[in-house]
Structures are given as structure tokens and as C-alpha cells.
Amino acid sequence: MRIVVEHGSQKVYFSRYMKEITTMVLNEALKNVTVLGAAGKMGSGISLLLLQEMARLELEQTGRLGSGGFVLNLVDTNETALGELRRYLRKQLVKYAEKNIVMLRIYTKDNPALVDNSDVIESFVNDSQDLLRTNTDPLSAKSSKLVFEAIIEDLDVKLGVYNNLNRVCPPDTMYFTNTSSIPISEIDSKAGLGGRIIGYHFYNPPAVQKLVELISSAGTTTDIKNISMELGKRLKKTIVPSNDKAGFIGNGHFLRDVLYSFDLVSELQKRFAPHEAVYCVNKITQDFMVRPMGIFQLHDYVGVDVCRHILAIMKTYLGNPGFENETINAMYKNKIIGGQFADGSQKDGFLKYEKNKPVGVYSLQENRYILFSEGDWTRKCDDHLGALPKSYTPWKALLGDKKKADKLGIYFKELFSSDAAGCVHARKYLECSRSIARELVKDGVANRIEDVNQVLENGFFHVYGPENTYF
């Protein structure tokens, strides 16, 4: 809809009017939504967020759930996983209802059958199930005005799905893709979506992570941009814009970070065995750099296979042959790929895990995991890295610490004045991270350096951004 404003004094009114239009359009679109890949790691979290908002909206509008006016289609090729998804959603809805009992009581105040809080919670959880429709056929999205896609990161597979959807869905259907690396313009142009697609990159797990990277292409319509921002507010997400270049901000920084870690491993291999070098770099990037986990643990969390695939996509679209690594390829060939089990526990990758904690390092040379408890090799590595600065505070302890900035300032001052090998390597790594962030801005991936900081702090849980006043 195009509205002509004749007087400058009407700007505030115009802005408010457009917000009201966006709200109305989103409310209507939320009456029929589809999630493709709903039972997957990302899709399940996206499904939960949408179900919570749709149930809240129906209660707000009608005072009850299950009227048939709101439908959430959960689509996945794995029928068994869809059953598990329903159980997951039910469990999470209980937690949501308990947390939001005051709001739910307001919406259901006219229902005399709901007396106690337990009645309200039970009713909300049970009746929310009536919004759900599970299916293995993507074409069940044919009546949806909003389609969220969280399927495999493969352009050909995505295009096959979008081409079919474009034939059967309404002409004003809007598509939200969770792609983490494929340019939005590629999907848009090749599927003929006319700008009705936007990158809506949730971070894992979507129900917990606050960040959503919002990626628009040159052809993305204003309507879907406005809807995306409004939806983000309702889902209580921090929206950070990223430009349409392969890898975007998050993986653009992370994968370059990964590649540097292998450069450091190669440097340390002049002194250590390969598995020892990996151990050293993982410790440098977690402890010395005060991050939530070391780079190789994070690599495993994302998945060695996933990282390899994203690097290939970035190599293709950015034309940089450097986006490839022989060690990653060798790990993939040996089927050592990390990732998570269905219960969220960590699979073995570069590191071996027990109760989600690293206990060993994989050796390509010996084709086995060498445990930390074997011999004294870890002590040799620790002795080489040296002691952490005296003011060191673990990452977890800094979260929510009101004196975090002061403590980080003191810590990095000590780190940058120490000649311990771990501190020296950490300094180089930190400087590389900052260089990567600045290049992302220079290359037009991020609009501002603050956006890179936002992604790393909110999406990767770093307690400081690469561009800061600490060093």
C-alpha cells in the first residue's frame, strides 16, 4: 500500500499509521503459518516460538484457543520426529504458561471454568495443541501467508521446495529462510519469489538465543522487512541487519575465525604433535580469550560437516579459494563430524566428550581419540602456554557481573603486557578477530562495526565484541 504524505507535520502520523498497518497484516498472516523442517534442531525452536505467539494472539483476540482460526503447519520428512516434536512443544508450553500466568489469567478472565492457576495452565497447554497440524508434505503450506523454512543448507533442495510452494501458495505469501550462508538473492531470483523472501537467521537454540540476523537482498520488499521487524519484537529477539553476502555476519566472522585457528595449529605443530596443538588452541580461545568455549569445541557444536559445507558456499559465492581446509576435509572423510544428539548432548568431533565436557582430542595420524588422561602431554601443553593473568575471571562468572567491564579492562591490560606464550597467541588471535570484523564492514557484509559486536555478543555469547576499548 502506498500512502502520500502532503505535509511534513504528518510524519509522526504517517509512521504510526504504517505501524498499525504492519500490525494488522502480521496478525492476519499469523492465522496460518507453516514451518518447513519443523522437527529439526532449528525448526523445533522456531516452531515453539511461533506456537507461543499464535496462541497468545488467539487468546488476546477471542479469549479462547482451538477455534480453528489459527493453524500452525509443522512439516518434516521424518514422521517419527514430528511425534517427538509434539512432545517437546507440550513440555515447553507448560514452562511458558507458568512464566506468563498473569497474562494468561487476563486473557481468560471471562472463563468461569478456569479457577486456579493450574486450570489456566492445563487449559492453555491442551488447547494450544489444537493449533497444530503435522505433515510430511511441504505442499500442506498452500494456505499459509507466512512460511518459515529451516531445511538443509543446500540451494538445489531449497529451490525445489520454493518452486513448488510458489505454484500453490497465495501470491502474497511471505517466506522466511533460516539459511546461514546462501545469498537470499539467489533463492529469490531462481525461485521467482518477487522479493517476498527474507533471511531470518535464528541462532541455536532459537527458543533461547536472542539474536536473529535479518538479511535483505536488493529485491526484498518493504512489506516483508516491516513484518520481519515487528515479528522480531513480538518474539523478543534482537534483530541485527546483515547484507546479502554469503556467510553474512555470524558465519562470516566465525568461519574466518576457524580458518585462523588452523593457521595457529600449524604454527604450534613446529613444537607439538597435531593433537597437542589442537588442545593448545582450544585452551587459548576459551580461557585466555575469555570465551564460552574453545574454537574447536564450538566447531564441534556447529558440526564439522556443517562448517565444511558453509565454507564451500562462501568459496563459491565470494570467489575465495582460501575458504577450504585440508584438516576439515580429512575429518569429514573419516566421518568425524560432531553435531548434537537428539537430546542436545554433544557428539564427538575434533574433541571427545563425556557429559558435554572435552576429555580428549582426535588424532588423524593415529585415527583415534587421545585422552587428556593419557600420559602427561596436557601438562606439557599447559606449561608451554603458561599461567593466565592473575585477574582472570571465567567467562561464566562474568555473565551478568555488574563490574564486567572493569574486570575485562584489568584482565586485558595484564594479558597484553604478559610474555607467557598463551597470552602472546591470544593477543594475535584477538587482533585477527578485530581485523575480520573490520573487513566485514569494509566489504559491505555489515553496515557498522557495532553490528558485528552485536552478533558475536548475542549470537555467540561473547562477553565483549572484537571492536572494544579494552585493547
Image (tube, rainbow, N blue to C red):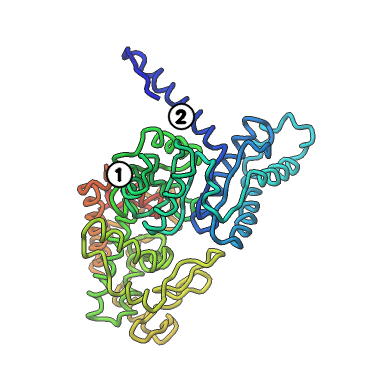
Is 108 on the left-hand or right-hand side of 412?
Answer: right
- Which of marks 2 and 1 precedes in the sequence? 2
Q: Relative to the observer, which residue lies in front, 8 or 466?
A: 8
**Is residue 116 shown above or below 8?**
below
Q: Are marks 1 and 2 in contact (CB under 8 Å)?
A: no
**Which residue carries the number 1 mark?**
450
Q: Relative to the observer, which residue lies in front, 87 or 427?
A: 87
Q: Position of residue 193 (x, y in %)?
A: 38, 42
Q: Relative to the observer, which residue lies in front, 112 or 435?
A: 112
Q: Secondary structure at mark 1?
A: helix
Residue at 62% from the left image edge and 31% from the top image edge: 60
Residue at 53% from the left image edge and 71% from the top image edge: 355
Residue reaching furthest to the front: 167
Q: Relative to the observer, which residue lies in front, 395 or 244?
A: 244
The amino acid at mark 1 is Glu
Q: Quadrant of residue 101?
A: top right
The amino acid at mark 2 is Thr
Query: Which numbered mark, 1 or 2, is in the foreground of this view?
Result: 2
Is 104 on the left-hand or right-hand side of 300?
Answer: right
Q: Position of residue 377 (x, y in %)?
A: 36, 83
Residue at 43% from the left image edge and 78% from the top image edge: 360
**Which residue carries the number 2 mark?**
22
Is 181 on the left-hand or right-hand side of 120?
Answer: left
Residue at 43% from the left image edge and 22% from the top image edge: 16
Q: Quadrant of residue 317?
A: bottom left
C-alpha span from label 1 to label 2: 27 Å
Q: Secondary structure at mark 2?
A: helix
